[in-house]
Image: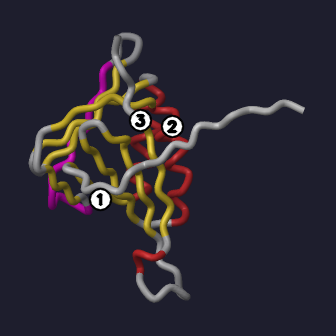
Amino acid sequence: MIDVEREHLDIPDCEYTCKCVMNSRRFQEFAKYLHSIGDTVVISMNKDVIKLEAEGDGIKASKTFHDGVGDVRVMSTEPLSQMFATRYLVLFSKATALAQDVSINLSAGIPLSVKFNFADSLAMNDGDSFINFYLAPNIED
């Protein structure tokens, strides 16, 4: 038998400074598309705009979403830009079947939060049922 010590990772409760809520299927489509272009995506938020950028072999793609356009809501109290692995965003997006909307939350020094809220007919409050994924940003050397 192998005795492996595990380090407990704890995500502190915090107020994220940058938040975006969008249709979960739309998020899934863009996560897959950006992953087909490159291994990383830069997520930037500023005031009422979120921008997703990926770069691959001779290809660069970006998509900008504005608050209030379509089903997108964006709120940012500070400009922030961080890089994340697209493969994990694609894995997270598999929860799309459970929720209509996804909340993407960023803050400096805190892992990205990708939260799927889903209504439960037995729950007293819509916020009682959710799946929250966390992803640390890539660190450039």
Residue at 30% across, 21% down: 60
CB within 8 Å, label 2 to label 3:
no
- Judging depth in this view, the residue of 69 and 53 nearest the camera is 53
Instruction: Tell me where residue 50 sits by quadrant.
Output: top left
Separation of disc 1 and disc 2 at Cα?
18 Å
Q: Nearer the viewer, mark 2 or mark 3?
A: 3
Residue holding disc 1: 21
- Judging depth in this view, the residue of 47 and 68 nearest the camera is 47
Residue holding disc 3: 136
- Judging depth in this view, the residue of 110 and 138 nearest the camera is 110
Residue at 25% across, 56% down: 15
Q: Secondary structure at mark 3?
A: loop
Label whose residue precedes the other's in the sequence (1 or 2): 1
Q: How many marks?
A: 3
Name the spot of residue 119 as percent of width and height, x first: 47, 77
Q: Secondary structure at mark 2?
A: helix
CB within 8 Å, label 1 to label 3:
no
Name the spot of residue 81 as percent of width and height, x first: 22, 33
Q: Amino acid at mark 3?
A: Ala
